[in-house]
Image: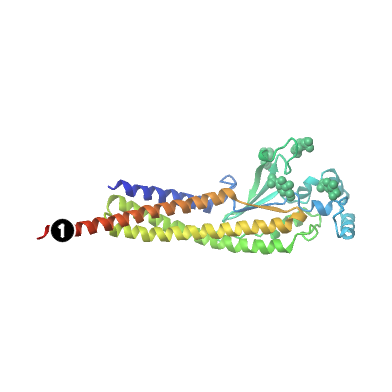
Amino acid sequence: MRILALIPLALSLTALILTFLALFAGHKQSFMQDYDIITLNTSQIGTNVFNTTSSSSSNSNSIVTFLDDLSNSLKDSLNSNLNSLAQTLGLHDFYSAHLLNHCQGFYAPAALANETLSPQTISRNVTRCSDATALYTFDPKDTLQRQLDASGLGVDLDDLRWPAEIDEGLGALRVAQKAGFVLYCVAAAFIGLAAVTSGVGVFWGEGRVGAGINVVVGVLAFVAVGVASGVVTAVAVKAAELVNFYGNDVGVRAERGGEFLAVTWAATALMLLSLVVWCFECVKGRRRQKGTGYGTEKRLP
Ligand SMILES: *[C@@H]1O[C@H](CO)[C@@H](O)[C@H](O)[C@H]1NC(C)=O
Ligand SMILES: *[C@@H]1O[C@H](CO)[C@@H](O)[C@H](O)[C@H]1NC(C)=O
Ligand SMILES: *[C@@H]1O[C@H](CO)[C@@H](O)[C@H](O)[C@H]1NC(C)=O
Ligand SMILES: *[C@@H]1O[C@H](CO)[C@@H](O)[C@H](O)[C@H]1NC(C)=O
């Protein structure tokens, strides 16, 4: 048994666990909720649009007409507390996308920080998650519109000035979710294989051939998890930027999931480390073989 080979085995096994966690985070309401790819904060959606005292409203006429159409009870609740507009309309404060589903809920104790409520003490209270499905894609426009319809107030996403550009950004997220799902499955398979070949290396695979196989499998596993992490990171960052740019005026914000990205990049780093150890083994094996050859040659005459 070779102690050095235990290191890549431990690294691969840890990376395998992290890859599964990235894949299954948030698939149930109680499981790693904060490890999302991106979160949409819709708690202030439409607040500007409905704020008739706001001077920045450009289409004030249509908004006034629209307000006239609203029921009195809605108007009352809007006037009494503009901050709960999303809830009044049947929407949630946030929608978080995972690889297999999305979850929704409300900020507790409130969505907005103030003098007495610091931003750090605001937490997410998830109320529901969609069913976990393979190749899941997050379509917030559809989700939000269905919830608006369900509230029966006759409010449309367009009334809330939902920007079309957001949908384009989140379209890329949908592609990334599908690609990410496939890539994480491939990565999990290769990392699992790397763990097996490392395990074989610990007890049996002495020398360069064993190390060489481990290097090949290690490269495949590292590339797979690296590409998966890269794709999801790029899209999460880009989509969040886009949503924040176009959604700012209508009270929609997005935040990329730092915790998720930490997990997936940790898995990538572990696979890189494991690969480095095997490369070292491989080079060491070659040196040993060369050295032996030289030695025998000298001893022969
Ligand atoms: C409504 O708009 C006015 C003017 O821009 C602003 O002072 C006020 O804070 C806004 N109200 C809310 C609840 O956003
Ligand atoms: C979270 O939501 C549930 C159901 O809506 C509610 O009963 C609970 O009090 C909430 N928790 C917090 C901390 O607000
Ligand atoms: C701050 O927000 C909390 C929670 O919504 C509320 O209870 C409190 O009255 C607010 N404080 C101020 C100073 O607005
Ligand atoms: C949600 O977005 C609003 C702006 O739309 C922001 O003021 C608030 O701090 C955000 N809340 C959280 C918990 O991120």
Of 43 and 155, the residue lying toward us:
43
Residue 136: x and y, percent? 58, 59
Question: Badge 1 local density, few (<14 within 10 Å), some, or many (20+)?
Answer: few
Residue 38: x and y, percent? 62, 53
In the displayed structure image, the side of residue 163 where residue 213 appears, left or right:
left
Identify the residue shown where x is 27% and y is 52%. Answer: 204
Q: Quarter of the image containing the C terminus?
A: bottom left
- Residue at which label 1 appears: 296
In the displayed structure image, the side of residue 207 where residue 300 appears, left or right:
left
Identify the residue shown where x is 78% and y is 51%. Answer: 89
Residue 90: x and y, percent? 75, 51
What amino acid is at disc 1? Answer: Thr
Of 73 and 115, the residue lying toward us:
115
Spot the residue most to the left. 301
Above or below residue 33? Residue 219 is below
Answer yes or no: is residue 78 visible.
no
Residue 227: x and y, percent? 50, 60
Whether the residue under disc 1 has CB within 8 Å of ligand 4? no
Spot the residue most to the top. 116
Above or below residue 14? Residue 133 is below
Of 197 and 285, the residue lying toward us:
285
What is the total number of numbered labels drawn onto the structure image? Answer: 1
Identify the residue shown where x is 36% and y is 59%. Answer: 215
Q: Secondary structure at mark 1?
A: helix
Answer yes or no: is residue 36 visible.
yes
In the displayed structure image, the side of residue 289 where residue 125 appears, left or right:
right
Above or below residue 256? Residue 124 is above
Q: How is the image coloured?
A: rainbow
